[in-house]
């Protein structure tokens, strides 16, 4: 077998100069050794969760081999192939760091005892002075289910605070709300292996080929079978380039197109009346609601030629099996829930949901993006997708945890609201695990002030992130393959991550650090875990009977079946790959239609800011980039951000390809390289978001959120782009800002010290 040696090389160009150092650091595994073992596991990056083997020699991870899991069939993308290079990376944090000399001081090495004692003593003092809710926990979905579960329990039982939320809030919380509302349950209704059964694929707001490269193989199989492909995206993505139809929508205007497609389906008599009558509720209101959305109206609002809207409706509507795949392009919106519901309306009207190879599916982003949102680290949620406001759910979980139900806090602030509570001084300390807020939250000048003003910021990470740089205490943790556990991939398939190495130096596993903090807080009796398996067994018990029921999933069954789909209520149950085949998850078994009207984004272009700025991903980097910017091969392909703009816009502004330019929004400005490309709408700019500090696009983005899901509107705000020799003057009229009470980021309504008081039942759909 010929091996591309490059991919086995350590990252040469990040913080470690091998040339002058001469030799790799001690402990760096050599790629040319034969492995002692191949450890079966899954990739740590996106929601596809490709199976892989890690090559291990002398306890060191030294490479990767293909593994034939049912959903990736041996393939890996460029990120999966080099993921293992994080393990022995010279930038790994190997001892706790403590900021000495107050806020202006430096982060310096400390012992675990010193660091943990300091954290616990400060937390006790802050809670005594300001109430339990003065501390927040901000978690993440790149961690295994067991750890995400532990974070929720630690916040509510260890610290007794109501404030816990996680980065999935920024990811697809709008799709989660939409599925819960329409179907009664939030999970992709079918496995990836169903995609080749579809006759028509409608991709709405996803750069599938760059963001889910291996899931894309299933799209190609569908194409091989003759499936037609339609893509709705302001950019002609690699997937759009191969499509039968590309609908270049103006950012933030998809509802006009989706409603017009549904109207055309109605006018062409393509509604599945039998299905609609038997399996759904609310159709008549939707039929009436879409009537004003003529193809011409869609063209006016969304900038997509009317005849393309009609053609898309016919391709989609005439297929016997059609599948809508949607992602952050429509979900990162101040009306993200409505965007997803508009997709669902279309699929329900065509009678597609609950059948093989058809319906709708959300392309879940993070490795454990699905599991992370159902095991209880979300502000309004308890394990098993239970709701924190439901008395019977509260009783059940309090019993599993062995605490009086009155001690269980109520709903806390969602991630963007937490930032406001920090900025407002109500939250005094935050424990961040598995998130890099300084890069990922919108309007990050405000985020920086909020984090810097905290009395105590504690960060668990294995590389010093932009957020960890601001911390008072940094606790070094394990990378994914230094621990075991389960993740739930984008299909709802629970898979097993296996341990291939020990954490380096003094680094510890996340769950060990959290359990130790609980012990030092005097809550050790609730956190007696000696292994991840004990945590897993408790999670199974806590999910029993819930919407996301893991009770019957054992690690052995995962191994035997190549993963188990939840719900899986008992050990003799095989799991549930396809949902809604007979009934939907609402008590009456029927799906719900919701009439959706187009509303403009929270900020529209105008005056000084004539462009729509959108942001997203490239294939070589992962999220905030804290991991992939350190992996030499990946970083060499995309070492810095750029702004994509259309040749017509560039010509008008005198900008040439490769030139450095300034992009401005009402919140900030940044300088970066221009990439002039005909693949983007002339009124739109695109910047990838994987970079920190002065290279972060979130200096510019709008913090407006969806009123229910609280997901930020990353995908559209008003912007200007200009040559660097143009002074950034005070400008003429500002953008037209559509802030309404519903879309404005709302201050969380509860004061601190109120964990034991139920909130008013306002907007508690999910
Ligand atoms: N390489 C890579 N892969 C990843 C990740 C990564 O960071 N890097 N992250 C993972 C995670 S957590 C996530 S959430 C997913 C995200 O996966 P995707 O949602 O596919 O990725 P994005 O780049 O955020 O946005 C998708 C597309 O939305 C388009 N878009 C922008 N505005 C609009 C709009 O108003 N309407 C429509 N229809 N489209 C619009 C953009 O042009 C872009 O092509 O990827 C996962 N996979
Ligand atoms: N402008 C703009 N902003 C966006 C988006 C966008 O499209 N545009 N997308 C949004 C989306 S979809 C997402 S998902 C968010 C993601 O935003 P973040 O969650 O902030 O991004 P990550 O890079 O995943 O941050 C994870 C951090 O935890 C560390 N980490 C990884 N694994 C572990 C682990 O097992 N344990 C611990 N303790 N730490 C770990 C990593 O080193 C990294 O520093 O960003 C959002 N922000
Ligand atoms: S597609 Fe996703 S899970 Fe698969 S190798 Fe790439 S990043 Fe990893
Ligand atoms: Mo995400």
Image (cartoon, rainbow, N blue to C red):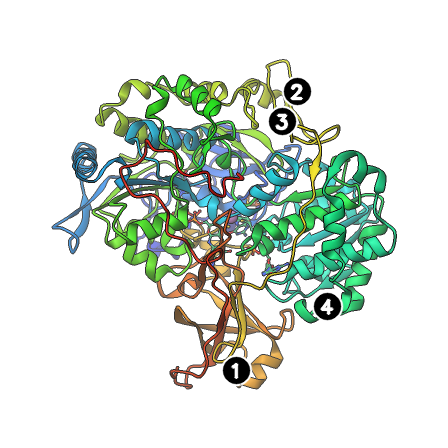
* For residue 255, above or below residue 550: below
Q: Marks 1 and 2: which is nearer the front?
A: 2
Which residue is at a point 30% across and 30% down the rendered structure image?
A: 160
Q: CA distance from mark 3 to mark 4?
A: 48 Å
Q: CA distance from mark 1 to mark 4?
A: 33 Å
Give the residue pinned by disc 2.
Answer: 574
Tag in front: 2 or 3: 2
- Position of 747 with respect to 608 (left or right) is left
- In 3D space, how far apart are the residues under numbered discs 2 and 3 (Cα atoms)? 11 Å
Q: Is residue 680 left or right of residue 508?
A: right
User: SS class of the residue under badge 4?
Assistant: helix
**Mark 4 within 8 Å of ligand 1, using the beta carbon:** no
Q: Residue 614, position in %: x, y? A: 53, 64
Which mark is nearer the camera, 2 or 4? 4
- Helix, strand or loop status at disc 3: loop
Judge the density around disc 2: few (<14), some (14-19), many (≥20) Cα neighbours within 10 Å.
some
Label 4 belongs to which residue? 297
Residue that carries the numbered disc 1 in the rendered image: 655
User: If the image is split into quadrants, where does the N terminus sit?
Assistant: top right
């Amino acid at each position: 077998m010929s091996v591309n040696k490059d991919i086995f090389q350590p990252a040469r160009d990040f913080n470690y100069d091998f040339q002058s150092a001469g030799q790799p650091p001690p402990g760096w595994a050599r790629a040319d050794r034969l492995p002692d073992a191949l450890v079966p596991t899954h990739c740590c990056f996106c929601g596809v969760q490709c199976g892989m083997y890690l090559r291990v020699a002398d306890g060191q991870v030294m490479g990767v081999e293909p593994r034939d899991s049912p959903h990736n069939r041996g393939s890996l993308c460029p990120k999966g192939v080099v993921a293992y290079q994080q393990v022995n990376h010279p930038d790994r944090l190997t001892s706790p760091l403590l900021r000495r000399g107050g806020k202006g001081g430096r982060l310096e090495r400390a012992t675990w005892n010193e660091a943990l004692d300091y954290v616990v003593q400060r937390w006790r003092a802050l809670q005594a002075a300001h109430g339990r809710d003065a501390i927040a926990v901000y978690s993440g979905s790149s961690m295994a289910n067991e750890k995400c579960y532990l974070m929720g329990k630690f916040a509510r039982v260890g610290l007794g605070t109501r404030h816990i939320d996680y980065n999935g809030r920024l990811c697809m919380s709008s799709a989660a709300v939409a599925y819960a509302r329409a179907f009664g349950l939030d999970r992709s209704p079918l496995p990836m292996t169903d995609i080749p059964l579809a006759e028509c694929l409608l991709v709405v707001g996803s750069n599938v080929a760059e963001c889910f490269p291996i899931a894309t193989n299933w799209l190609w199989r569908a194409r091989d079978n003759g499936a037609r492909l339609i893509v709705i995206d302001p950019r002609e993505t690699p997937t759009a380039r191969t499509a039968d139809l590309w609908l270049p929508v103006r950012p933030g205007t998809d509802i006009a197109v989706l409603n017009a497609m549904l109207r055309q389906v109605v006018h062409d008599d393509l509604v599945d009346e039998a299905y609609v009558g038997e399996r759904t509720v609310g159709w008549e209101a939707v039929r009436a609601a879409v009537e004003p959305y003529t193809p011409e109206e869609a063209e006016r609002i969304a900038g997509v030629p009317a005849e393309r809207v009609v053609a898309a409706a016919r391709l989609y509507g005439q297929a016997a099996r059609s599948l809508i795949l949607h992602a952050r392009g429509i979900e990162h919106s101040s009306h993200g829930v409505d965007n997803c519901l508009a997709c669902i309306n279309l699929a329900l009207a065509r009678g597609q949901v609950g059948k093989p190879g058809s319906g709708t599916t959300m392309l879940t982003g993070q490795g454990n993006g699905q599991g992370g949102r159902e095991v209880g680290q979300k502000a309004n949620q308890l394990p098993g997708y239970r709701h924190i406001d439901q008395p019977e759910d509260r009783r059940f979980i309090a019993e599993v945890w062995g605490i009086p139900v009155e001690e269980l806090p109520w709903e806390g602030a969602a991630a963007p609201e937490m930032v406001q509570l920090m900025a407002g001084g109500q939250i005094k300390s935050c424990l961040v695990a598995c998130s890099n807020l300084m890069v990922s939250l919108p309007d990050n000048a405000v985020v920086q002030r909020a984090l810097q003003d905290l009395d105590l910021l504690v960060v668990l990470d294995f590389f010093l992130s932009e957020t960890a740089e601001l911390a008072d205490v940094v606790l070094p943790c394990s990378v994914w393959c230094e621990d075991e556990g389960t993740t739930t991939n984008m299909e709802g398939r629970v898979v097993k991550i296996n341990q291939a190495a020990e954490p380096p130096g003094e680094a510890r596993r996340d769950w060990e650090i959290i359990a130790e903090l609980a012990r030092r807080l005097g809550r050790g009796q609730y956190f007696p875990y000696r292994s991840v398996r004990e945590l897993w067994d408790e999670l199974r018990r806590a999910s029993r009977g819930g919407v996301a029921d893991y009770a019957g999933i054992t690690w052995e069954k995962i191994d035997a079946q190549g993963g188990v789909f939840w719900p899986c209520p008992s050990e003799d149950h095989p799991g549930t790959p396809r949902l809604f085949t007979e009934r939907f998850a609402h008590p009456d078994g029927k799906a719900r239609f919701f009439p959706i009207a187009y509303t403009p984004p929270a900020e529209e272009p105008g005056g000084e800011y004539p462009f729509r700025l959108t942001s997203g991903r490239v294939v070589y980097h992962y999220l905030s980039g804290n991991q992939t910017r350190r992996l030499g091969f990946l970083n060499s392909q995309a070492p810095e951000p750029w702004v994509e703009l259309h040749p017509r816009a560039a010509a008008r502004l005198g900008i040439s390809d490769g030139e450095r330019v300034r992009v401005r929004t009402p919140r900030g400005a940044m300088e970066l390289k221009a990439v002039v490309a005909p693949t983007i709408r002339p009124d739109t700019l695109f910047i990838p978001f994987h970079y920190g500090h002065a290279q972060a696009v979130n200096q510019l983005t709008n913090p407006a959120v969806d009123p229910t899901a609280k997901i930020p509107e990353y995908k559209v705000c008003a912007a200007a782009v200009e040559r660097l020799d143009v002074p950034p003057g005070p400008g003429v009229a500002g953008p037209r800002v559509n802030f309404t009470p519903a879309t404005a980021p709302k201050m969380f309504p509860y004061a601190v010290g109120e964990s034991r008081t139920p909130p008013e039942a306002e907007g508690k759909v999910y």
